[in-house]
Image (cartoon, helix red, strand yellow):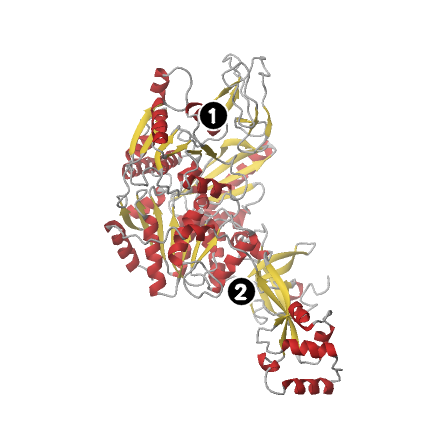
Amino acid sequence: MAGLFVDDRPAAGYARVAVEQGVDVAGDGLTYAVPAGMAGVVVGARVAVPLGRGNKPASGYVVGLRSVEDGPGEGLEPARVKAVLSVDGDGLTLPAELIELAKWVAGYYACPLGMVFASVLPGGVKRGAGLAKKKVVRWKGGGEGGRGEGSEGRREEALREAGLRVTKQVRAVLAAMTGANEDGVELGALLTAAGVRSAGPVERLAEAGVVSIETRVDLRAGLDVAAERVAARLSDRPTPSADQAAAVARIGDALGAFGVHLLRGVTGSGKTEVYLRLIERLLAETEQGAIVLVPEIALTPQTVGRFVARLGQAGEGRASGGVAVLHSGLTPAQRHAQWQRVRRGDARVVVGARSAVFAPMRDVGLIVVDEEHESSYKQDQLPRYHARDVAIKRGQMAGAAVVLGSATPSLESWHHAKSGRYGLFELPRRVPGLNVPRVEVVDLVEERRAQRGIHLISQRLEHELRTTLDKGKQSLVLLNRRGFASWVACPDHRCGWQMACERCDAMMVFHLRGGDASNENGRDVPRGYVRCHHCEAQRMLEQHCPVCGKRTTLFGLGTQRVETELAQKLPGARVERMDRDTMTRPGDYERVLSRFEAGEIDVLLGTQMIAKGLDFPGVRLVGVISADTAIHLPDFRAAERTFQLVSQVAGRAGRGSEPGVVIVQSFDPTVDAIARAVAGDYAGFAEAELATRAEAGLPPWRRMARVVLRDRDQAACHRRAAATADAVQSAIDREAAQQRATMRGPMACAMARLADHHREQVVLLADDAGTLQRVLTSARNHDRLVSDAHTAIDVDPVALL
């Protein structure tokens, strides 16, 4: 390949490049030579470089530069250093602050730097989605070329002196250009105005030096105006409560310096109003901007509309204020347009999901993480970063205030707040006009003793559903389990056959086909199929047990089964189901919520997606079908997640002037997480759960990293897991961290087989983040512990299945 090495092309310097692939190398990238004469190679620039033995072109980002005098470094021979192939034609560069943040993410989460950049830069930006290239004709030397008395004669004389014949077409082009300003005229429009069919006359004028023909790139993307429609209805600026005013004043005084502030407010206490007033103060008093992170599922037009109503929509050339939105629901072109507006400074406020923490804002003064306890802030694939913790690090780097908001904070954040590491501000009461809902518990064990047959909806919940319908109000019904039945089995306990996934250690879940459950209580099993909710394998339901031949039976519950029972018990009610099986197309979620807001749905049934960020005054009743679905999972965070889910969905009731009702059904209401969630006792739950974690030596008292090994061959998986355990233990010994770090494993994962891959894990626990990082870094540098197709390194994991 010509020009591949430095001895082919003189070097103007050397660049460290993080290639956008899973290449895990020591340091922060690979070294390449910058050919003499190549412009635009600056820190943050996106470049193409040759990679591997085949020198296949790969994209990467410049993360460091060295002069020719300093040489390539690392003992490299200058003559053998490969050269940068090209620089991004659109001049795409990342701010230096994001480069440093990406380096921290790569180091802390033990992943290749190039893979971090894959998350930092949206795909639509890399591909140039929405970019339209056009040719523009300008007077040479500025916009005055077509103005002034006698200018036409002078131009024609200059053309003849240049040896150009002034034809009728050339005169027509010159006339059409008359009055053109510095921005010029688009070539197509110019030819139309001049009545000329080809660009020949314009090209001759360019050769003569009269005009220039330039290629200009415009970004065209129509923005979704749903949020603006919502904003028109949310123009009120409510008077803050005493609790809100106090939080705004105290946190507002801390703006301008780094600090983490936990805002714990009960649902309906007005946390969003606190965020808005803090942002307004920041925009009024400084030139800085704000980033607001919201869980993806809560990024509805309703949520975004509240920010647009108060802060305005980012527009072309808008130098202050304005809201830009960054989330996966946008088209690539829309996301590119929003990203570029932030980069140019046209928007000083960004509202977005997890990846918006990497928004290219150059002067950040405030970062808000709403519903900071949400597990969706943790990315489950490389790079496995937690957006809340990255937000805190970015705030530290930028000297910005960070506000974490939640009604049910993560125990990590609560622990830091109670220990004084974070500031703590509480909103213990709902805002005036919102009433605290009445919460009742139904013991399903007692219910089944009193009721004949199997009913998912208790008599108490059924009564309240009917009462709510009669009053013309709306209900939310939660069950965090989709499908119709959670397992299929032989009814003969002596046989014991159950229908398991052939690829995973999990039961197959039965789904109705077309919602037909007409045969549920008859001799035949309803028509449908079974699906694994882990690998998505799917096949038809076996009507008979393959072992003894008896007709199979459906056990357990799911949202489809509840939907069927609602139709039977509430004939005529307008019921809508919202789960991953129904929300399949872009915009489905927003369309259903819009109908619910308009009163076109009486009962909204769904999984956890209906528990977050919804604020509808018409909701009088919230019913939790089973609060126990996750409490017994083999994960130390199971109780915490159960408390949060029940508390969050209960908070959706009573958002109007009328008090709401919450009915929580449970097979064991005495479980601490459920009992305290029903009582609204977050502080009591947190204190008890933290004591349990302290006794077991689990986060937040210690820091955790989990290395998961996977392989189709069980023996190979076990060998790799044993080698990983040796590497981690060697790193602990090498760092003399025996008193501050411990290792558990190798051992089988809770789900030991997933998608035909056997899985084992090694768990590292350390007293502090510094020790954890030293051990992981040592293992990576000395024992080549890498994240690849067979190995996942998960620092601060939020799920252990």
Q: Is residue 690 depicted above or below 545 in this figure?
A: below
Q: Position of residue 412 (x, y in %)?
A: 36, 44
Residue matched to label 1: 564
**Does 419 sit left or right of 709 as displayed?**
left
- Can residue 392 be seen here? The reply is no
| Amino acid type, mark 1 | Thr
User: Secondary structure under badge 2?
Assistant: loop
Q: Where does residue 290 sit, x and y in percent of width and height? A: 40, 58
Mark 2 vs mark 1: give the one in front. Answer: 1
Q: In which image quadrant can residue 543 be found?
A: top right
Q: Is residue 10 left or right of residue 101?
A: right
Q: Quadrant of residue 362?
A: bottom left
Q: Which residue is mark 2?
A: 43
Question: Could you classify mark 1 by the number of other residues whose Cα lies within 10 Å: few (under 14), some (14-19), or many (20 or more)?
Answer: some
- Along the line of sight, the residue nearer the viewer: 252 or 105: 252
x then y, percent, for residue 374: 41, 43
Q: Residue furthest left?
A: 242
As rendered, which of 199 and 169 lies closer to the eye?
A: 169
Q: Amino acid at mark 2?
A: Val
Q: How many numbered marks are there?
A: 2
Residue at 60% of width from left, 73% of height from top? 184
